[in-house]
Image: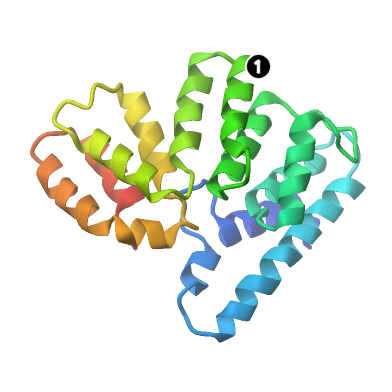
Amino acid sequence: TFKEKGATSGLAFDTYGEKAFSPHLTLYLADHGTKNEAWKRQYPRRFENFFWTQFLEAKADSDFERLYFDSFVKVAKSNVAQKRLKAALEGSFSKEFDLDQDRRWAIVLKLNTLGTDDAKSLVTTELKRDPSHAARIMALTVRVSRPDKSIKDRWLSKISAENPNMTSAEMKAVIEGLYPVDQTDLRREGAEEIYENLVKLSGERDEKFLESYAQTLVPT
């Protein structure tokens, strides 16, 4: 039944989350002893291999082909997977595949979230290909997603400032990219400031902002 579209999509979402900041299965297994250390090393690679193999075998230009590729991007973590994603951006793919701009941004986001070498430069490259307003907003999400505490601290302070000089779309982009769920250690390091800011902002910002801030940034 893994080849059923709904089951495949559900497997990827349940295991690694629908979005970069969504709760997922591996998050809840991350802190439960040495037995799960082996799980964390072994099973992510199995998911990568499964979705990659299914993508290569899927009928060209089919919904399954796109679904398996999107799922692979979601679970990609190993060095091998990162090289495959870079190859996709460069057009040196092992299979002909229509990599649209949304998928290109998904790859750039994934590589930056993982802290892949040279991933920062990919943002500039994509903005040259796609200079739209939506792309500039996406680039903001990508840039704050990197596993760098100084980046987190700077942007957390900025969105929590009395006058952040940012649009609501820009603040939402930062919030959604700031602490991807795999960056639990960085989120915990920022927890004290996150909670303090939430108390301060409760009397300053609208309900929509506060809901987004609390649901996305507060450690679980």
Q: Quadrant of residue 172?
A: top left
Q: Position of residue 42 (x, y in %)?
A: 70, 73
For label 1, the residue is: 129
Kind of residue sitting beneath label 1: Arg
* Depicted 135 relative to depicted 79: above or below: above
Picture layout, residue 146 above or below residue 192? above
Place residue 173 in its image quadrant.
top left
Residue drawn where x is 72% and y is 26% of the image: 100
Q: Residue 219, can we see it? A: no
Tell me if 193 is positioned left or right of 50 in this view. left
Specify few, some or many for label 1: CA neighbours under 10 Å numbering under 14, 14-19, or 20 or more: few
The furthest residue to the left: 203
On the question of residue 13 being in view, the answer is: yes
Q: Residue at x 11, y 34 (%)?
A: 204
Q: Position of residue 107 (x, y in %)?
A: 65, 38
Mark 1 residue element: helix
Q: Residue at x 38, y 50 (%)?
A: 149
